[in-house]
Image: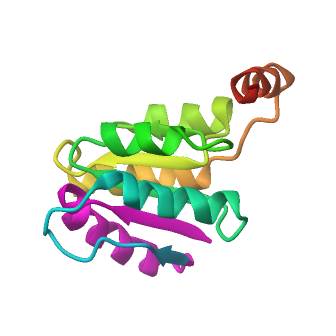
Amino acid sequence: MIAIACDHGGYVLKQEILKHLDKRGLAYKDFGCDSEAAVDYPVYARKVTDAITKGECERGILICGTGIGISIAANKVKGIRAALCTDCFAAEATRLHNDANVLALGGRVVGPGLALKIVDTFLDTPFSQEERHKRRISLIEED
């Protein structure tokens, strides 16, 4: 199950991603927001990260205007590895090397065509399981 949320700056792109997930037959839980009315992105980042850390969802997608703020908020949560991606190479690399569990996108930065390709790349790329990457992730997760 995929957890997805956005702030007002990511609302339009989130609607496109939801349609795309429906076409692919992928299960998701939409944590809002539900319009372009101004909201606070950390609230929505927390909803997605909570769903992942509680085991309700395996991965997440977060969208704000730039993707920066919402990714910073998500990465404050232990066990979350959120990656802001603006191209497919970054989406593939962050799954292969970082086992990122949250994709962050900028609704005002990446157009819908590219965003959907980034989403597909992120969702379809497995973690490499290479020992060097496991070691690096464990170093990130140390307190």
Q: Chief secondary structure of the magenta span?
A: helix
Q: Is residue 124 left or right of residue 10?
A: right
Residue sitting farthest toward the left: 37
Using the image, determine if residue 94 lies above or below residue 46: above
The colouring scheme, among rainbow, by chain, secondary structure or one colour, is rainbow
The part of the image, by quadrant, that contains residue 12 is bottom left
Q: What residue is rendered at 57% in x and 34% in y?
A: 94
The quadrant in which the C terminus is found is: top right
Q: Where is residue 9 in the image (x, y as percent from the top left)?
A: 18, 56
Name the residue nearer the viewer: 41 or 1: 41
Using the image, determine if residue 134 lies above or below residue 77: above
Q: Where is residue 93 in the image (x, y as percent from the top left)?
A: 56, 31
Q: In this view, does 96 lie to the left or right of 86?
A: right
Q: Give the range drawn in magenta.
A: 1-27
Q: In this view, does 74 lie to the left or right of 52?
A: left
Using the image, determine if residue 44 lies above or below residue 77: below
Q: In this view, does 93 lie to the left or right of 62?
A: right
Q: Position of residue 31 (x, y in %)?
A: 43, 73
How many numbered marks appear?
Answer: 0
Q: What residue is rendered at 79% in x and 27% in y?
A: 138
Residue 119 in magenta?
A: no
Name the residue nearer the viewer: 13 or 37: 37
Q: What residue is rendered at 19% in x and 74% in y?
A: 35
Name the residue nearer the viewer: 69 or 12: 69
Q: What residue is rendered at 53% in x and 75% in y?
A: 28
Residue sitting farthest toward the right: 131
Residue 7 in magenta?
A: yes
The quadrant in which the N terminus is found is: bottom right
Q: Where is residue 89 in the image (x, y as percent from the top left)?
A: 46, 32
